């Protein structure tokens, strides 16, 4: 089937604007992860869902970041009042019930805050 | 902060030459995952290693996990332009909620 998809691929926001990033995981995948990747760095964990339950949000950098997965499939990462330090690539990954660590990634959303 | 050390940070290799990328952890790993990333794209899963001493190959790429399960190497034989990209190792240390801990990546450039 289709892989993980993310939209938009690129987003430019003015400082202070709210943004919403969407992730469509692989169909049937139970686990969904959001990562933040700064230029030249590996991904940094933001949050993890198992079905619709957000089991870990310890990586969210501030209360301006909010993620949801209301029906256990599509997920949205929302960033309120964007700041320049939020500029990064936001990656979504999903994994099946077999091995949650074997994660399949979407192409990412490159967010630039001006 | 990066809890996995990858070396080298970048590598320029003549097409056709072999190369090795390393990934080292200070803690024992339950699993080590190699991914490749091209600019503007997501991470592509390459291989997973879970047992000490395990070795896996896919086409011209071979990955090994040492017996202590703290170090992994990725070896490319007879490199091709299609191998260019950023190679990332991700680790399962079983001390987190299914999240992978990542190295900073190795940028590989293949000179024709």
Image (spheres, rainbow, N blue to C red):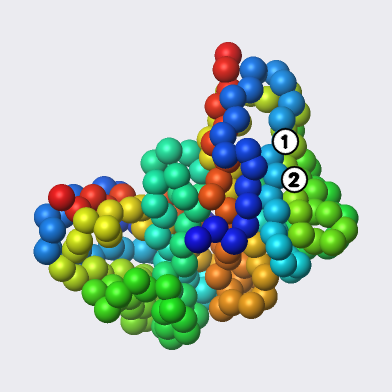
Residue B39: image x %, image y %?
A: 43, 38
Residue under pointer 1: B20
Q: Which mark is residue B73?
A: 2
> Horizontal and vertical percent for residue B92?
66, 67
Q: Residue at x 67, y 70 (%)?
A: B93
Q: Are marks 2 and 1 on the same chain?
A: yes
- Label 2 resides on the chain identified as B
Is residue B52 shown left or right of residue A44? right
Placement of B33 over or under A51, stated as above or below: above
Callout 1 secondary element: strand
For marks 2 and 1 on the same chain, the one whose residue lies earlier in the sequence: 1
Res. B99 visible in picture: yes
Label 1: how many Cα within 10 Å (few below 14, some 14–19, many 20+): some
The reply to whether dot 2 and dot 1 touch (C-beta < 8 Å) is yes
The residue that appears at 30% across and 75% down in the rendered structure is: A62
* Mark 2 residue element: strand
């Amino acid at each position: 089937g289709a892989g993980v998809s993310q939209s938009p691929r690129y987003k430019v926001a003015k400082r202070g604007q709210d943004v919403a990033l969407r992730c469509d995981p692989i169909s049937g995948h139970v686990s969904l992860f959001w990562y933040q990747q700064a230029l030249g760095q590996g991904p940094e964990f933001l949050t993890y869902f198992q079905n619709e339950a957000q089991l870990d949000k310890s990586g969210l950098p501030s209360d301006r970041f909010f993620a949801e997965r209301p029906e256990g499939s599509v997920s949205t990462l929302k960033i309120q009042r964007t700041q320049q330090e939020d500029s990064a690539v936001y990656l979504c990954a999903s994994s099946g019930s077999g091995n949650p660590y074997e994660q399949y990634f979407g192409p990412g959303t490159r967010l630039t805050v001006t | 902060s990066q809890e996995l050390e990858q070396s080298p940070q970048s590598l320029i290799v003549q097409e056709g030459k072999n190369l090795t990328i390393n990934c080292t952890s200070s803690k024992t790993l339950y699993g080590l995952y190699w991914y490749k990333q091209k600019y503007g794209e997501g991470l592509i899963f390459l291989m997973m290693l879970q047992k000490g001493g395990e070795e896996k190959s896919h086409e011209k790429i071979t990955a090994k996990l040492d017996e202590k399960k703290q170090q992994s190497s990725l070896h490319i034989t007879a490199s091709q332009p299609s191998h260019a990209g950023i190679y990332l190792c991700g680790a399962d240390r079983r001390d987190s909620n299914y999240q992978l801990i990542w190295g900073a990546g190795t940028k590989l450039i293949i000179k024709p």
